[in-house]
Image (cartoon, helix red, strand yellow):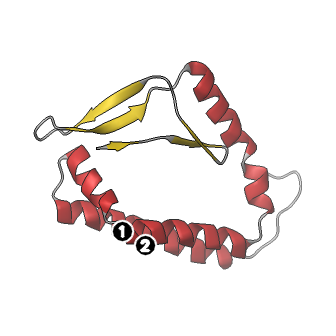
C-alpha cells in the first residue's frame, strides 16, 4: 500500500487527515492521499503562484534538464503504471503505455523549449 504526500514549495508535506483510495475493480485499499485543510490548500496555491518567476529566470537548458529528469523518473519507475492500472481499472499494459507516452511528451516539450526563438515585448500580453 502506498501513502502519498504533497510536494509544496520544494518540501514534502503531510496532513492530519487522509482519504483512502480503493480499486474500482475489487475495492482493495490501494493507499491514501492527504485531505488537506483549507489553510494547507491556500499555502500550496500561494507557493504555486510564487514559483513562475524562479522558473522563468532559469535558462532554457536548465528548464529542459528538469523536464528530462521528470520524464526519466516516469520511464524508470514502472510502478507508476501499476498504480495507475489499479486506480482507474485499466489494463496494466495500457496504463504503463500511458506513463511512457507521458514521459515522451515531457521529453518533447523539453526539447521544444530549447528551440523557442523570438522577442518578448514589454507591456504586451
Residue at 52% over, 65% down: 70
Residue at 62% over, 21% down: 39
Where residue 27 sits: x, y (%)?
Answer: 14, 34
Q: Is 2 situated above or below 81?
A: above
- Residue found at the far right of this picture: 122
Q: Is residue 105 visible?
A: no
Element marked by disc 2: helix
Q: Mark 1 points at which residue?
A: 101
Where residue 21 sits: x, y (%)?
Answer: 28, 35
Q: Distance between the residues labelled 1 and 2?
A: 5 Å
Left/right placement of residue 16 relative to residue 113 reads left
Checking the image for residue 104, the label placed there is 2
Q: Can residue 80 be seen in this view?
A: yes
Closer to us: 116 or 29: 29
Q: Is 46 situated above or below 72?
A: above
* Residues at discs 1 and 2 in contact (Cβ within 8 Å): yes
**What is the crowding at mark 1: few (fewer than 14 residues within 10 Å), some, or many (at least 20)?**
some
Left/right placement of residue 27 relative to residue 73 reads left
Where residue 81 sits: x, y (%)?
Answer: 29, 59
Checking the image for residue 33, the label placed there is none
The quarter of the picture where residue 48 lies is top right
Residue at 73% over, 57% down: 55
Q: Is 31 situated above or below 62?
A: above
Amino acid at each position: 500500500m502506498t501513502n502519498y504526500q504533497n510536494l509544496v514549495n520544494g518540501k514534502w508535506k503531510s496532513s492530519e487527515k487522509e482519504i483512502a483510495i480503493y480499486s474500482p475493480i475489487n475495492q482493495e485499499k490501494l493507499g491514501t492521499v492527504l485531505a488537506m485543510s483549507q489553510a494547507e490548500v491556500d499555502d500550496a496555491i500561494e507557493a504555486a503562484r510564487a514559483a513562475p518567476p524562479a522558473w522563468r529566470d532559469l535558462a532554457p537548458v536548465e528548464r529542459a534538464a528538469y523536464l528530462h529528469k521528470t520524464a526519466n523518473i516516469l520511464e524508470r519507475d514502472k510502478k507508476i503504471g501499476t498504480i495507475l492500472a489499479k486506480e482507474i481499472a485499466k489494463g496494466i499494459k495500457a496504463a504503463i503505455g500511458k506513463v511512457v507516452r507521458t514521459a515522451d511528451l515531457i521529453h518533447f516539450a523539453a526539447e521544444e523549449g530549447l528551440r523557442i526563438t523570438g522577442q518578448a515585448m514589454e507591456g504586451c500580453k
